[in-house]
Every structure is written in structure tokens, then in C-alpha cells.
Image (tube, rainbow, N blue to C red):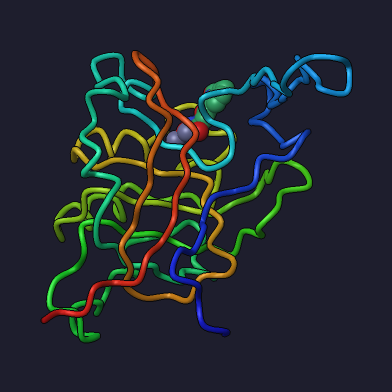
Amino acid sequence: MSPQPAVHDISRALTPGHPNWPGDAPFSVTPAARIGAGDSVNTGVLSTSTHTGTHVDAPWHYSDSGHRLEEVPLEVYVGPCLVLDVRGHSPVGPEVLDGLKMGGLEALPERLLLYTGQPAHWQSFPADFAALTPEFVRRAAGLGVRLVGTDCPSVDPLTSKTLEGHAAFWETGMYILEGLNLSATAPGQYQLVCLPLPLVGVDGAPARAVLLPLQEQG
Ligand SMILES: N[C@@H](CC(=O)c1ccccc1NC=O)C(=O)O
Ligand SMILES: [Zn+2]
Ligand SMILES: [Zn+2]
């Protein structure tokens, strides 16, 4: 794989017609002012679900007693992370965490990002993707992980009504980042900088997420 640039974008590009969760509000940017139409500026009107593309879930998304987005500390989303290639594991179970510490890591970073093989662009909404088992979530929490990111649109299967994966995040106090684009990312350690839109009182928000090289230990 070619060397990665200093700032490696792992966000999904939000193009017109970006597929939405079945039944959810479509994503659109509607032209408002246009210089070509005699206006002094170009502007657009954004309409989106809070769960479009690369986004974070606030716990209130999956529990009525959960925190809203502004109550989640930004430190959850910014700091050292480990990108794991978990292709071939569907659903993703605790076995993907076996032996990580023996693989040369002194301690597991607090943020884990899972590449399950999703492409950079979704032509249509992926119906069949790799969910996370509650056992995976609990094992990760036991290893000190605070945030799990996935390239899938959800940590539970599309048809799940019980959302056991989300529930395990709620029970363990871990947080969720969904819809990453990890198709051009080499597995390994990085600094994650993921900044959800500063929406107040919401259940989640689209985010820009980038990876920076891990600082060398002095
Ligand atoms: N759990 C998914 C989203 C989700 O479940 C959803 C999103 C929009 C409209 C309905 C949804 N789920 C309904 O069962 C997510 O976390 O993004
Ligand atoms: Zn979500
Ligand atoms: Zn979710």
C-alpha cells in the first residue's frame, strides 16, 4: 500500500443521493442563493438524518436515559486508535481481539476502528453488513476500549429490532462511531480526530473523521 498522507480522511463523502437507512430522511443539499442567478453568494440548504454517512451515535439514540450528544466528552473521539482488519468475521465476535496484546501492543488504545470490507462509496444502502456481537462489545470494554468505530452503517444488523449490540455499548459505557471509510487505510495505530457536528440535544451527528500518524514515543 502506498504511503499515507499526513492527514488521512476516513469520512464517507456525502454526495447527492447518498443512501439513507431504509425509511429514514434522505440526504440533500438544495441550492439556495446562486451568484449565477444574481445573488451575491452561493449557499445551500442541508437536510440530513443524524445517522447519515460517517456519524456518531449518542447514547440517547438507543436508550431514553442515555446522554445527548453534547454530554459526550470530545476526548472519546480524539486520541490514539487501532485500525483492525476484521474481514471474514460476520458478525464480528470477540475472537478478533485475541492475541492483540501479544502482537506487540503494550496496551490496547482506547479507540478501535474495524474494517469489515465496506467500499468507499455506497451506490445503494448496504443491506448485508457485519454487525458486532454483544460478546465482542463486552470483551472490548474489558480491555479498556472506550470507542468502537465501524465502516458499517450500524453495529446491529439492519433488521434488528432489539439492538443487542447497541445495548451492550450502553451497558458498558462505550461509544459508537459508524459509517467510516476504511477502504484505503492500512491496519495499525494512529491518532483519531473525529469531530461530530456540534448539534445540541440530538441522538447523533454526522462527523468528519481523520487519522494522523501516531507520535513517536520520545
Ligand atoms: N441504528 C442505526 C440507525 C437506525 O437504527 C435507524 C435510523 C433511522 C431510522 C430508523 C432506524 N432504526 C429503526 O429501527 C444507527 O445507529 O445508525
Ligand atoms: Zn447511527
Ligand atoms: Zn448505531
Residue drawn at x 58%, y 40% is 53
Q: Position of residue 143 (x, y in %)?
A: 15, 61
Up-down relation of residue 104 to residue 126 (above or below)? below
Q: Position of residue 149 (x, y in %)?
A: 40, 51
Q: Splitting the image into 4 quarters, where does residue 18 fall?
A: top right
Q: Quadrant of the N terminus?
A: bottom right
Residue drawn at x 28%, y 39% is 169
Q: Quadrant of the C terminus?
A: bottom left
Residue drawn at x 27%, y 50% is 78
Q: Position of residue 81 (x, y in %)?
A: 29, 62
Name the one closer to the observer, 50 or 90.
50
Residue drawn at x 71%, y 49% is 122
Up-down relation of residue 114 to residue 68 (above or below)? below
Q: Splitting the image into 4 quarters, where does residue 66 fall?
A: top left
- In-image side of 85 versus 120 (left or right): left
- In-image side of 179 versus 65 (left or right): right
Q: Position of residue 92 (x, y in %)?
A: 43, 59
Up-down relation of residue 74 to residue 217 (above or below)? above
Q: Count every numbered label the image shows and give the total.
A: 0
Name the one closer to the observer, 47 or 86.
47
